Image: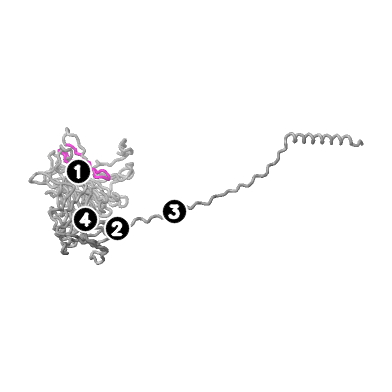
Amino acid sequence: MKTPDGGADFSALVRNPAETITAWVVIDDETVITGADAGNLIYKTTRYGRRVWDEPSVPSAAGTITDLAVSPNYAMDGTLLAGDNASQVFISFDEGDEWDEVSGSDIAGATWAGVDNDTYVVFDPRYADNNMVYAASDDIVARVEIDTAEDMGDLEFDNLSGSSPDTSADLSSGAAAGASGMVISDDGIQDGEHVATLYVLDGVAADGVDATNSAGITGGVWRSLNPADDLGDVIFEQVLAGFGDAEGQDFSPVVGAISNLELTGGSNTLYAIDTAAIVAIPDVIYTYTDTLAAPVVLSSPSDGEGIDSTEDIVFEWEELNSDTVNVYQIQVNEEDDFPSAADLTAGTTDQEGVAADVHTTAYTDGNDLSWRDEAASGTEHFWRVRVGQQIYSATDDAWGGGPLLSRWSIARAFTTKVARAGDVTEVRPAPAAQDIVLSPAFSWGRLTGADFYEIEVATDSDFSTIIAVGTSESEAWLIDTTLDYSTSYYWRVRGISFTGAPEGSWRTSIFTTMAAPAAAVPPVKVEKAPDIIVEVPAAPAAVEVIPGWMLITIIIIGAVLVIALIVLIVRTRRVV
């Protein structure tokens, strides 16, 4: 059926597939592809069901189709995936007209004799770049890279589900348990990398008894923040493991089978249906929003900040989800890709070199500073934070940490400044300080045994070009020259006794002056315009007006003369 108005009205297609529908995808208003409950059958219509549905060619080995997926780049590549009820995956590169089996064997060897193994498939959102697809069947989650230059039957799936963070290597085990749905979210660009999150729905036993994994946790959803990473680095975790029904957050049904996993577009919000096996218990729709499929946001130190190695470094970040998160992990390293072998902090707790578990949004590195004692002045280091991993304790029969891993924060850098015992500390301007005024005041911490202090300012780290020197009996000094804009300067200070002997070594630091202000706009000079003189021509002389009585008199005289002339003419006319 189809609705043109958001579900207010539905109308049936004129024609439908000839067999019971077991899976389907809608390509557009006209095109629908379905699986059928009759062996290796796929149906397709490109005319909104107005004619008999086509039956594309499917390998004879295919079982009943249980899932279909559309390539995120379908408009360009026309690629589709199908999974069947025998742990097999099929692919079409021509909009579903012809299908080939991917791999000559079941995915990652997933086989349970005598049991139907429904298979679920998805494309990686980055398929156009990495060619990866995923399949889940029973207790196996696997992936394969589609190489169109190869025969599809020669490709092999890699098992991903052996990376789950508890002691089990697979999804829930049991005669009828395992994968019952799979979706993947496109999480966009984070820290310059296109990332995605894979979710696999884990079913339960159909006889009403919960199937459990090795940690005793029923059903639920497994998720991986890095399904496309190197095989050994992929991590799966169980969503809401250990949460009870009383908290209203359990994604694990008591009876029936949880199925129909769906994902809200453009988000990490999941929906699933628990189809109860007991009439008295209605079906239940579960929903869950994965707020931890995001990176932690760091607060301080700021990126590139200079840190005095004699002071405890306080790392701070923003809460990611204050309602559920109770453990964060922090990592410090000399390299921005954080190889575990080069980890610089004490207390490494797992294979990824995580430095410490902390229960607040701040961590003070005050336990082991030996790695900074060996660092040269200005050495750069990197740090990052994520929500800690959830770990199940069989001894305590409880879960700790997390509740789930988040993505790592964007890494920040900081530089260390070494001050040996007896050297001046707490210098200001701080190491690597920016935007310093052109006549700065210098200050430092008091040094026991020093009677006064020597200060030098130079343009190079060797102090071969010194531009200012001074002495001070207090822990402050004001330079008596004006520095240049946007220039880095080195300065150092040391204590001196009255005998002239140095107390400790030079303490060196660096700062950069402020940028030059924008050039002032010259004032606009406004000159007074000359007065405009308009000459008005003199009015013409007034014309004397003839009085009315005179005008009438003239008219009368004229009339009399005319009459007199006529009379004269008449009288003097000659008679012929």
Amino acid type at mark 1: Ser
Task: Please name the residue that numbered disc 4 is placed on.
Answer: 155
Front-most of residues 65 and 498 = 498
Specify whether residue 218 is painted magenta: no
* Nearest to viewer (mark 4 / mark 2): 2
Task: Please name the residue that numbered disc 3 is placed on.
Answer: 524
The magenta span reads: 251-276
Task: Please name the residue that numbered disc 2 is placed on.
Answer: 438
Instruction: Report the residue at 21% width, 38% height from top.
Output: 285
Q: Is residue 310 left or right of residue 68?
A: left
Task: Please name the residue that numbered disc 1 is placed on.
Answer: 322
Sooner in the amino-acid sequence: mark 3 or mark 2: 2
Amino acid type at mark 2: Leu
Sooner in the amino-acid sequence: mark 1 or mark 4: 4
Q: Is residue 89 left or right of residue 543?
A: left
Measured from the top left, where is residue 221 in percent x and y? 18, 44
Residue 544's quadrant in the figure?
A: top right
Is mark 1 in CB contact (under 8 Å) with mark 4?
Answer: no
Q: CA distance from mark 4 to mark 2?
A: 67 Å
Q: CA distance from mark 3 to mark 4?
A: 77 Å
Sooner in the amino-acid sequence: mark 3 or mark 4: 4
Give the farthest residue toward the left. Answer: 395
Q: How is the image coloured?
A: one colour
